[in-house]
Image (cartoon, grey):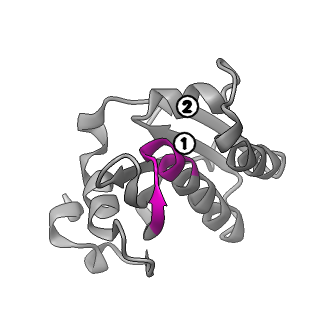
Amino acid sequence: MEEGPPGRVKLNVDSSARGNPENSGGGGICRKDDRAFVFAFATGYEVGSNNLAELRAIHDRIVICLKRGLTKVIVESDFKVVINLLMEKSSTPWRWKPWVARINALMQLGSFTFNHILREGNDPVYSMARARSGNQATTLYLHMASLPEQVRG
């Protein structure tokens, strides 16, 4: 994990849309500085684009972090378009503005850094997001042992 203030956690987030637009899902894994597992989360969303699913996944995971008292968060995603929106490096299309505004409001409650990573670095999270695509149920994993086997590594 990159150096930062003590108590910082890393939140890897990814999403999946089985078409664009189509049923989608989002997942995330949160770890401490020492890479110790904190929680993982996967949920299905209704029909939408992959970028919208990524924004929703980031929003939902930040909400969980804040509810757990985690306010120093490095968010990593392989969706460069979305990361650029959140870092205000590009203008936000009208259809995504409500989700960007919600995330910006949450960011006022803590210290959040957004980083773009390569897809290969996000494979476990993508597997969770893909499995939830189109399934509106939400799964919160609080123990490493409860994660799907393909994600644990």
**The quarter of the displayed image where residue 37 is located:** bottom left
Highlighted magenta segment, given as a residue range = 45-55
**Mark 2 secondary-structure assignment:** helix
Q: Is residue 59 left or right of residue 109?
A: left
* 10 Å crowding of disc 1: few (<14), some (14-19), many (20+): many
* Left or right: 134 in relation to 82: left
Q: Assess whether residue 27 is covered by the magenta stretch.
A: no
Q: Are marks 2 and 1 in contact (CB under 8 Å)?
A: no
Numbered circle sitting on residue 83? 2
Residue 135 in the image: state x and y as whole percent.
37, 76
Looking at the image, residue 53 sits to the left or right of residue 125; the answer is right
Q: Secondary structure at mark 1?
A: strand
Residue placed at 82% from the left, 49% from the top? Answer: 105
Quadrant location of the N terminus? top left
Task: State the quadrant of the C terminus.
Answer: bottom left
Query: Residue 28 location in percent, x, y?
Result: 43, 58
Relative to 92, say whether 138 is above or below: below
